[in-house]
Image: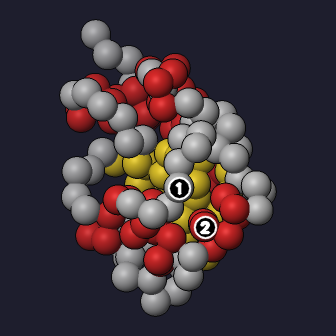
Amino acid sequence: MDVRGNAQPINKIEADAIAVAVFKGEKPDDGLLKTLDKAVDRAITSIIKSEEFLAKEGETAYFHLTDSGLQARRLLLIGCGERKDFGPRQIAQMGGTAARFLRSKAARTIAIVPRADGDVERVAQTVSGVAVL
């Protein structure tokens, strides 16, 4: 499995699958989640509204994409709990959850979108489990 850091718009990312952090209380009516919701024909709105996905830490929702406007053919949402508590530990957990889940789905390349603040390189290292010296 190939994991890379990338700062491209989500619709330009070339990967078998994209894993995206989602925080408790978020609604898919703005920004990245709105774009992704459109790509899955409002299925994100549906699972949030039905409370099947509450974005608790480690919770997942998996979608196959066709004619979505994204280059990836699979989307994994990963619950990361409260945005205010999202730090290096949660970023690393999110990366591990994405890698384990998508490996089981035979994804060879994945893009992980932690939606974290801070230095992009440091966040990419944390996601992939690379020690920062």
Relative to 1, say whether 116 is above or below.
above
Considering the image in quadrants, where does the C terminus appear?
top left
Left-right relation of 88 to 40? left
In percent of width and height, residue 31 lies at: 35, 59
Q: Earlier in the sequence, mark 2 or mark 1?
A: 1
For marks 2 and 1, give the CA distance: 7 Å
Under tag 2, what secondary structure?
helix
Residues under numbered marks 2 and 1 in contact, where contact means CB atoms less than 8 Å apart: yes
Residue type beneath disc 2: Thr
* Position above or below: 27 against 75: above
- Return the residue found at the far bottom: 67
Left or right: 113 in relation to 23: left
Regarding residue 58, the answer to whether it shows in the image is no
Question: What residue appears at the point 43 percent right and 34 percent down from the top-left corner?
Answer: 128
What is the x, y in percent for residue 4?
34, 48
Q: Which mark is residue 35?
A: none
Circle 1 sits in a helix, a strand or a loop, which is it?
loop
Q: How many marks?
A: 2
Rendered location of residue 25, percent (x, y) = 58, 43
Q: Residues within 10 Å of mark 1 (few under 14, many from 20)?
A: some
Callout 2 crowding tier (Cα within 10 Å): few <14, some 14–19, many ≥20: some
Q: Which residue is mark 1?
A: 27
Residue drawn at x 45%, y 63% is 29
Image vertical order of residue 83 relative to residue 47, above or below: above
Q: Residue at x 56, y 82 (%)?
A: 41
